[in-house]
Image: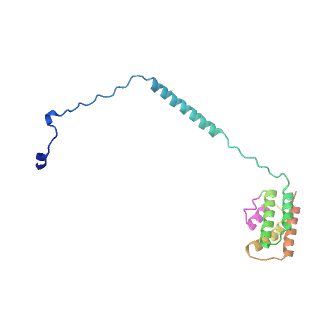
Amino acid sequence: MFLLSKLTLQTPVNQLNIRDIKPPFDTPSNFFSVIILGVVIVVGLIFGLYYLRKRRQKKPTIPIVEVESRPAHEIALDQLQALEKDTNDMEEYHTQISYVIREYITARFRIPALELTTAGLLHELIRNQVDKTCIDRLQYFLTNCDRVKFASYLPNTSEAAERMTDARWIIDTTMM
């Protein structure tokens, strides 16, 4: 109560001008702009759906990659010939010669030789009814290459030449 008695007004209460509430804003009854806006939205939706449908139907273009049309044995023999000159690093040499033969087997027999272990590859070749002597020689070849790659075996140059001879024999025996 004490606060109310000290409250003073600048103007007396009976002289205040209190304004009345404003009436709602009247909008013109012109629906032409609303109809135009609705038509624009509908046309936009139709074009958007048409564009999305066309885009979905359009098949992605696949780039044309030229593939060598030479037989697999010719490609492998060329790779072996290029590899034969570089016998400085024995581990790299045996890795590359093994890779060339596995790539050749992939192209020749349609077996994913690069993804299979040596045992898995030999099993697949047996299923494809490859000659037993060829499988035995390939097993000998891949086992020796694996020994150099994974067991840190360091062969001499005569053994590297023997790997090259084995690789050429495998290609010559299995080519069509």
- In the drawing, does residue 1 fall left or right of residue 152? left
For the record, the magenta segment spans 111-126
Which quadrant of the figure has residue 74?
Answer: bottom right
57 or 84, which is in the foreground? 84
Q: Within the image, what quadrant is residue 86 found in?
A: bottom right
| Residue 95 visible to the viewer | yes
Q: Which residue is painted at 14% across and 36% down in the image? A: 13
Residue 18 magenta-drawn?
no
Q: Residue at 52%, 29% (x, y): give it.
A: 40
**Is 53 on the left-hand or right-hand side of 40?**
right
Instruction: Pinpoint residue 5: horizontal percent, then vertical percent.
Output: 10, 46
Q: Is residue 45 left or right of residue 74?
A: left
In this orientation, which residue lies closer to the viewer: 123 or 104?
A: 104
The colour scheme of the drawn protein is rainbow
Which residue lies at the image location 77% right of the left edge and 72% below the top edge?
91
Is 115 covered by the magenta stretch? yes
Q: Is residue 104 above or below residue 151?
A: above
Q: Position of residue 64 (x, y in %)?
A: 76, 47
